[in-house]
Image (spheres, rainbow, N blue to C red):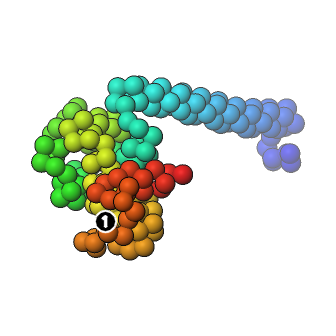
């Protein structure tokens, strides 16, 4: 380090040492913060896994339905904040209700159980489980397929049917075991 005019060598040494100590302290702080952030991410991942296990126990769904509602949640959550806000929900409810039996339809307040103005993954799963209980899993899956053209199951169903799900003769294109909401086409979509 060049000697600054007006400083003797001892002052210069102390200034250099102080600057080095400050750099070291800053590096140690960065390391500490990075370690804390990594630990927080690890804890969040563990909590998410535990929450997922709890949801599966509280609201059991088949593997097919599990994937379908998870995919649907991701489609609805346009801003990817892991919550469904009222405006994201509004259009979805209208679409799903058009293909859902009246007893399986819902209101926002019924799904937003904690009243925070958003639907969490847990609230979503509980709501979808309730629809499954009220109208059956097969009905829920077909409502999803018919309501959301971009849903992976709808894409696969159209591919297998060789046409549009909106076509009134859609079921006529399906093999007998898949007509009228048969699960064959859905099972094949996951394989």
- Residue 16 in view in this figure: yes
Residue located beneath label 1 in the image? 171
Viewer-side residue, 36 vs 73: 73
Q: Residue at x 34, y 45 (%)?
A: 83
Q: Quadrant of residue 106?
A: top left
**Number of dots carrying numbers:** 1
Q: 46 or 184: which is nearer to us?
A: 184
How many C-alpha atoms fall within 10 Å of the one at disc 1: few (<14), some, or many (≥20)? some
At a point 54% along the width and 51% down the height, the residue shown is 191
Q: Is residue 40 above or below residue 93?
A: above
**Secondary structure state at the residue bearing disc 1:** helix
Q: Is residue 142 above or below residue 149?
A: above
Asked whether residue 88 appears in the rendered view, the answer is no
User: Is 89 placed left or right of 105 in the picture?
Assistant: right
Residue found farthest to the front: 176
Please identify the quarter of the rendering in which residue 166 is found: bottom left
Q: Residue at x 28, y 72 (%)?
A: 169
The quadrant of the image that shows the N terminus is top right
Q: Is residue 76 above or below residue 56?
A: below
Q: Position of residue 188 (x, y in %)?
A: 49, 54
**Residue at left 24%, top 35%?**
133
Report the residue that reaches farthest toward the left: 102
């Amino acid at each position: 380090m060049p000697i600054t005019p007006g400083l003797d060598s001892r002052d210069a040494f102390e200034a250099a040492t102080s600057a080095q100590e400050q750099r070291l302290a800053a590096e140690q702080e960065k390391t500490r913060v990075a370690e804390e952030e990594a630990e927080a991410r690890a804890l969040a991942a563990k909590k998410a896994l535990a929450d997922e296990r709890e949801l599966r126990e509280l609201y059991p769904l088949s593997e097919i339905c599990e994937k379908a509602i998870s995919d649907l949640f991701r489609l609805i959550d346009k801003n990817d904040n892991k919550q469904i806000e009222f405006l994201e929900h509004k259009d979805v409810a209208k679409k799903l209700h058009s293909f859902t039996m009246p007893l399986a339809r819902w209101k926002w307040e019924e799904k937003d159980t904690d009243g925070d103005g958003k639907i969490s993954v847990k609230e979503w799963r509980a709501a979808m489980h309730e629809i499954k209980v009220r109208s059956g899993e097969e009905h829920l899956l077909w409502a999803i397929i018919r309501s959301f053209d971009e849903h992976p199951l709808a894409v696969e169903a159209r591919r297998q049917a060789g046409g549009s799900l909106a076509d009134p003769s859609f079921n006529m294109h399906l093999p007998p075991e898949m007509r009228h909401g048969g699960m064959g086409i859905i099972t094949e979509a996951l394989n």
